[in-house]
Amino acid sequence: MTADRSVSELGQQNAGIIRLKLLIGSTNQISQNLSVAPPMPKNPKFEDVIIVCNTYQAKDLVAADPDGASDPLVHLYHMGSMCSGTVFPNTLNPCWNERIYLKTCSINGVLAPIVVSMYDKDTNAIGQASYDFMGSAIVHLTDAPIITNMDAYGDSLVAKWYQLN
């Protein structure tokens, strides 16, 4: 069996691109004065927040499997929270069209950037999964609108492409 390859082993800087649309919501009907900035306060006040990530597609991903394809999977990371999307098997150009909800927090009304990582998921003959890192992007939430009704935001927002490195 040939081992899978990670982006670092391939020596590539460009690991493909991913198209996302991000929204920010709250279980407590978040206030409209939430800001996006990096400072760390001395006496932090934590507020529950939900980051909604509409994951559409990725292009030109790194081939991590010996057959020249990958089984890509998106992971979102924010402030110690993590969630995953669905594996799209045997492709370098997946089309997920799925919505991922990440329950996390803001600190004194400030949101840190999220990390979007792409992994190749493989399962061996006895059902054990392994994940090979393919690339990641840091996404600042400055353009993510704050919403109070998770289902009423509509499709007026434009999805953006992010470079995976």
Image: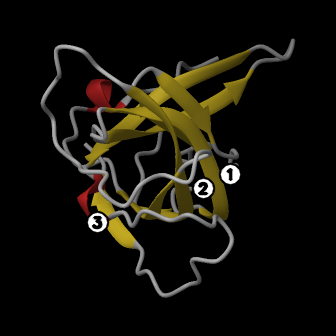
138 or 120: nearer the eye?
Answer: 138
Q: Is residue 15 above or below residue 10?
A: below
131 or 102: nearer the eye?
Answer: 102
Q: CA distance from mark 1 to mark 2?
A: 7 Å
Secondary structure of the residue carrying tag 1 is loop
Binning the other alpha carbons within 10 Å of mark 2 as few (below 14), some (14 to 19) or many (20 upward) gives some
For label 3, the residue is 143
Q: CA distance from mark 1 to mark 3?
A: 27 Å
Residue shown at 39%/67% (left/top)? Answer: 145
Q: Please say if the residues under marks 1 and 2 sit with CB atoms less than 8 Å apart.
A: yes
Binning the other alpha carbons within 10 Å of mark 3 as few (below 14), some (14 to 19) or many (20 upward) gives few
Task: Name the front one of labels 3 and 2.
Answer: 3
Q: Quadrant of the N terminus?
A: top right
Q: Position of residue 149 (x, y in %)?
A: 63, 67
For label 2, the residue is 91
Secondary structure of the residue carrying tag 2 is loop
